[in-house]
Amino acid sequence: MTVSVDSLMVIFDHGRARFILPGLFLRSPHMVQYLAVIRNEKGLHARPSTQVVEAGKQYQAEVILHYDGYDANASRLLELLSLGAECGAEIQITADGPDEEDALEAIKALVEQEYDLD
């Protein structure tokens, strides 16, 4: 169930309220999505997050990563880092816009990439 209260969206998910800011609410029924698994042993830390942001800014589509009840825009570094996604975490990636499929593929590859930390 979704309720709109002025500019704040409230979604009731299995009896739990989730609040979504207007810029993060996905409006299009045509968006693409993918469930990615973090494979990097350090999780979605600074290096992969920076690469995601650089890739996200190359596309017109809005790309959002969803994890543990929180949303992060793929072109905002602090939002990505605040997700705190660790190795093995399942991240739902959604893209909505004119180049959404290309954007989703690029972000998906970076999120699932294993990084050599040596």
Image (cartoon, grey):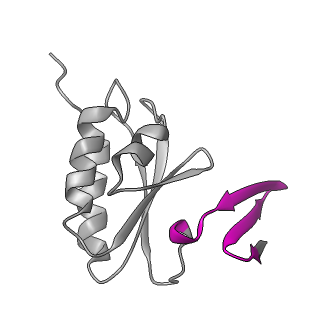
Look at 29% across and 33% down and name the residue there.
46
87 or 3, which lies in front? 3
Q: Which residue is drawn at 40% across and 43% down?
A: 78
Foreground residue, 21 or 18? 21
| Residue 37 seen in render | no
Main SS class of the magenta portion in the image = strand
Q: In which quarter of the image is residue 39?
A: top left
Task: Decide: is 52 above or below 44.
Answer: below
13 with respect to 95 (left or right): right
Bounds of the magenta span? Answer: 4-24
Q: Specify the farthest residue to the top.
A: 118
Using the rendered image of the protein, determine whether residue 57 is visible from the camera's viewpoint. Answer: yes
Q: In which quarter of the image is residue 117?
A: top left
Q: Tell me: 6 left or right of 95.
A: right
Q: Quadrant of the N terminus?
A: bottom right
Q: Is 108 covered by the magenta stretch?
A: no
Q: How many marks?
A: 0
Q: Where is residue 13 in the image (x, y as percent from the top left)?
A: 76, 59
Residue at the spot 36% in from the left edge and 36% down from the top edge: 44
Residue 69 percent location from the top left of the image: 63, 49
Q: Does 101 sit left or right of 28 as displayed?
A: left
Residue, x 38% and y 38% (percent of image)?
A: 38
Q: Tell me where residue 5 appears, x and y as whole percent.
A: 77, 74
Position of residue 56 relative to residue 9, above or below, is above
Asked where in the image residue 100 lies, by quadrant, the reply is: bottom left
Spot occupied by residue 36 in the image (x, y as percentages of width and height)? 40, 49
Check the picture and name the quadrant holding the C terminus: top left
Residue 21: within the magenta? Answer: yes
